[in-house]
Every structure is written in structure tokens, then in C-alpha cells.
């Protein structure tokens, strides 16, 4: 009788606990995949911290990840469908229960990759996150890619409609001759290389003119949405739209090219944004934002430069602290040795860089002031981590306060975006007119 009572009590306890409390291990909150040419990130968000081990395997190339304290669930299986066909790194994901409370993820790779696996503590709206970053095994040369892109664009622009028509006629004639060519009758010559990155037939490709490079940095991205407006407009989306339009306008200028720290919805750590600008020997660095403030009526655009000492205002200090926290939300592998070395190097800010940044900021602020209201009539200064390139004039532009309903509507308006882009282009042009770039050979 006593045993039967105990069993009835245990059954009642099972009913009261429900499936969530009875489940072994962590519960999955969400899974996400962020594909990009730079790297692809896979995130597993859970209610408790997870630990994982990983190794690389061949035939086919894949990374195998064992996650401890986890049972296979429908939420985890969602990862399979999250992979997009155009993902540069992931061909597919397989998920299975490898051992009790150990789930195995197998990520089939499209290219040799250098995976990083790390955990993130809860921050902002996120719970515990387990992150898998797939970087290329060999990092591409961004300056070479930029030069090849510029050369290809110049070559394409130089080809007239008449040239294209003549080429079509020659191709047709070559096909005809090649089809009848027998016994020493020549067929058509091999066509020129179709790859625009290859040198033209006349000789090796050389860039002898001074190419001016402007690094554009759309803030936030990926796991970090940035500020969110009253109607749901996300900062990371609107600043990317502005930056893409600005890239088009800059690339249309003679001997100018824009490099973007991100051209899609993925996260780039603050130190990596600066490193990207330095790797292409950028002449300018412009970080584009649309932040929020604690007061919804705050309005107007602002321009910021780095400060060697304290911030020029309480608002500037608050804004810098908020932007510098982006790495916590976006998710950075703090154990990465490369990241630590880069951060140390970027702390060597110089007075000359700040002086030039203030000049650039003044020109941009003056032009933006013609588009809309300014929050402050001068360039503000604070300790923004993203402005710490010691050899590149750098500014951060707050295009408007997305937390203000009226300004959120403006940011959503394509006409305002176009006006803003024209103001930025004009400010950049005025800066270079007064401060010509140093004559450096960017070579081949």
C-alpha cells in the first residue's frame, strides 16, 4: 500500500512538472545562420550555457561539433533549413544525437575554413549563445580585390555599344570559319579571357594613377541590430542601405573606390572594422549610424571624431560607451590572439589623425546641415573604439535619431537617404579639395 501511494505521488509529480522541466539538458531558444563572403556564423541560443568541442575532417571537408548537455530537439533540427544555397562556406548541416546528452553537428564545407567556436554570456535581449564562426582558411587580399574590381569597372565602362556589336559580329564570323576550317584553314583565334580580374591581352594590368580609397562602415549587423525605432526600423538595416548608395556614388568618381566593412547583414567586430580599413590603405574611414537616445524627442544629425582625452559632452561620452558595447551584443571571440594584437595596435591614436578627422568631420557636418537639422553645430569628440586607426582620418556620422518617430520616418524615406548620400559625397569632396591625398603608389 505504501509503495502504491509513492508511485501515485511520483506520477502526480510528473504531470505537474510537464515536458520542459523533465527535459534533460538545456532548452533551445533560437538557432540562426548568418552567411557572408567574409565568414558565416552559426548561433545556438539556449536558456543555460553550453560547451562544445570541434574538429575538422576531410572527404568531404567538414567541421564536426559535439555540444554537451543537450538533447536533440525540433529547434535544433531547424538549423538544417536555415542554410541558404548561396552560403559561401556551408554546403549543409546534419544534426544527430551522438551520445546521451551530446548532440553532434556536422557542417559540410564549400571551401577550406578555419572554424572558431566560443560561448557568449547573456546580454541585451539574448540568453546564452554558442557561436560557430567559419572563416576562410586563407584570408584574401582586400586591396588587390579592390584594385581588380576598379580595373574591371574601368574596362567595362570603356567598351562602347559599337565595340560590343563589332565583337558579336567577329564571334559569329569566327564560329563560321571555325566550323568549316579543315586542312590548314584557320579557325577563329581563342577569345580574350572572360574573367575581368585577368590582365587584358595587351599586357599586364598596372594601376599607375593614385586611387583614393574611402572605407565605409555601416554600424552593427548580424546578431547586433543596433537601435530600433518606434515602428520597428532597425539601425543595422537603414545604415547599410545608406552605405550601399554611398558606395555607388563614390565608385562613380574618377580614381575613387569605396571599401565596405560589411556589405550584408553580418556582424563585424569593432577592431576588425578598423583593420579592414588599414589593410586597403584607406584614405578616409566613415562609420555610419542612426542611434537612439534615452529621450525620444532627441533629434538631428551629429558627427564625431576621436578624442585624446575626455569627451566633449556628456552625450558624446554616452554615445561612445553605447557604440563601444556593440561587440558584446554582436559577439566577439575574446580569446582570439589576432583580435588582442590588433586591439593593442589600434590604441596608438595620433594627434595628426585626430586633427585631420576634425577637418573631415567639419566638412561633412556642414553639408549634412543643409539636408536637415543638426543635433550639435560642431564636431563632437569621444573615445569611439571604431575611430582608432592611427593613420586614417576617421569620423562617425549619426545620420538621425531612430528613436525619434519623425526622424525614423525620414530614415525610411528613400528621398531623405538620397539627400543624405549627396551630402556625404559633397563633404568628402570638399575635404579632399582642401587636403589632397598624399601621392602614394598603390601599385599592382
Image (cartoon, helix red, strand yellow):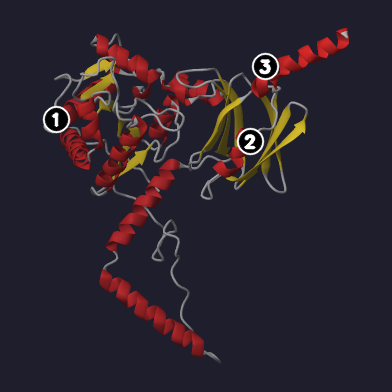
Judging by the rendered image, the residue that carries numbered circle 3 is 16
In this rendering, position of residue 369 left or right of residue 254: left
- Label 3 crowding class (10 Å Cα cut-off): few <14, some 14-19, many 20+? few
Residue 119 percent coordinates (x, y): 59, 22
Q: Closer to the camera: disc 1 or disc 3?
A: 3
Between the residue at mark 1 and the residue at mark 3, the CA separation in whole angstroms equals 60 Å
In the image, residue 440 sits, relative to residue 299, either above or below, namely below
Judging by the rendered image, the residue that carries numbered circle 2 is 74
Q: Closer to the camera: disc 1 or disc 2?
A: 2
Residue 282 in view here = no
Tell me the quarter of the image containing the N terminus.
top right
Q: Earlier in the sequence, mark 3 or mark 2?
A: 3
Secondary structure of the residue carrying tag 3 is: helix
In the image, residue 177 sits, relative to residue 193, either above or below, namely below
The tag on residue 372 is 1
Residue 169 in view here = yes
Between the residue at mark 1 and the residue at mark 2, the CA separation in whole angstroms equals 49 Å
Residue 226 percent coordinates (x, y): 37, 26
Give the total number of marks visible in the rendering.
3
Given residues 370 and 205, the one toward you in this image is 370
Given residues 162 and 2, the one toward you in this image is 2
Amino acid at each position: 500500500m505504501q509503495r502504491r501511494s509513492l508511485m501515485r505521488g511520483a506520477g502526480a509529480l510528473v504531470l505537474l512538472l510537464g515536458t520542459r522541466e523533465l527535459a534533460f539538458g538545456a532548452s533551445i531558444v533560437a538557432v540562426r545562420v548568418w552567411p557572408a563572403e567574409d565568414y558565416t556564423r552559426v548561433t545556438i541560443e539556449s536558456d543555460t550555457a553550453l560547451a562544445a568541442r570541434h574538429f575538422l575532417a576531410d572527404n568531404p571537408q567538414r567541421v564536426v561539433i559535439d555540444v554537451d548537455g543537450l538533447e536533440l530537439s525540433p529547434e535544433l533540427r531547424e538549423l538544417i533549413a536555415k542554410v541558404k544555397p548561396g552560403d559561401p562556406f556551408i554546403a549543409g548541416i546534419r544534426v544527430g544525437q551522438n551520445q546521451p546528452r551530446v548532440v553532434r553537428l556536422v557542417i559540410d564545407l564549400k571551401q577550406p575554413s578555419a572554424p572558431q567556436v566560443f560561448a557568449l554570456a547573456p546580454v541585451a535581449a539574448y540568453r546564452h549563445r554558442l557561436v560557430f564562426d567559419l572563416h576562410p582558411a586563407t584570408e584574401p587580399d582586400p586591396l588587390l580585390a579592390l584594385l581588380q574590381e576598379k580595373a574591371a569597372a574601368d574596362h567595362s565602362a570603356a567598351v562602347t555599344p559599337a565595340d560590343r556589336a563589332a565583337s558579336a559580329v567577329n564571334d559569329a564570323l569566327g564560329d563560321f570559319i571555325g566550323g568549316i576550317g579543315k586542312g590548314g584553314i584557320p579557325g577563329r583565334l581563342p577569345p580574350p579571357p572572360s574573367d575581368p580580374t585577368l590582365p587584358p591581352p595587351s599586357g599586364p594590368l598596372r594601376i599607375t594613377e593614385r586611387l583614393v580609397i574611402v572605407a565605409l562602415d555601416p554600424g552593427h549587423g548580424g546578431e547586433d541590430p543596433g537601435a530600433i525605432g518606434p515602428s520597428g526600423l532597425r539601425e543595422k538595416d537603414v545604415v547599410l542601405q545608406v552605405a550601399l548608395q554611398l558606395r555607388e556614388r563614390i565608385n562613380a568618381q574618377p580614381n575613387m573606390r569605396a571599401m565596405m566593412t560589411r556589405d550584408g547583414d553580418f556582424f563585424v567586430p569593432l577592431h576588425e572594422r578598423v583593420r579592414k580599413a588599414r589593410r586597403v590603405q584607406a584614405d578616409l574611414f566613415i562609420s555610419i549610424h542612426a542611434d537612439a537616445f534615452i529621450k525620444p524627442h532627441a533629434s538631428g544629425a551629429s558627427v564625431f571624431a576621436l578624442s585624446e582625452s575626455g569627451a566633449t559632452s556628456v552625450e558624446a561620452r554616452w554615445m561612445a560607451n553605447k557604440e563601444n558595447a556593440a561587440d558584446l551584443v554582436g559577439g566577439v571571440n575574446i580569446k582570439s590572439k589576432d583580435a588582442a594584437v590588433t586591439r593593442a595596435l589600434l590604441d596608438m591614436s595620433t594627434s595628426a589623425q585626430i586633427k585631420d578627422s576634425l577637418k573631415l568631420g567639419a566638412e561633412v557636418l556642414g553639408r549634412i546641415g543643409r539636408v536637415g537639422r543638426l543635433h550639435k553645430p560642431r564636431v563632437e569628440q569621444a573615445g569611439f573604439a571604431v575611430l582608432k586607426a592611427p593613420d586614417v582620418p576617421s569620423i562617425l556620422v549619426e545620420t538621425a535619431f531612430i528613436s525619434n518617430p519623425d526622424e525614423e520616418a525620414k530614415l525610411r524615406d528613400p528621398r531623405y537617404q538620397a539627400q543624405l548620400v549627396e551630402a556625404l559625397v559633397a563633404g568628402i569632396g570638399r575635404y579632399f579639395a582642401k587636403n589632397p591625398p598624399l601621392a602614394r603608389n598603390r601599385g599592382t
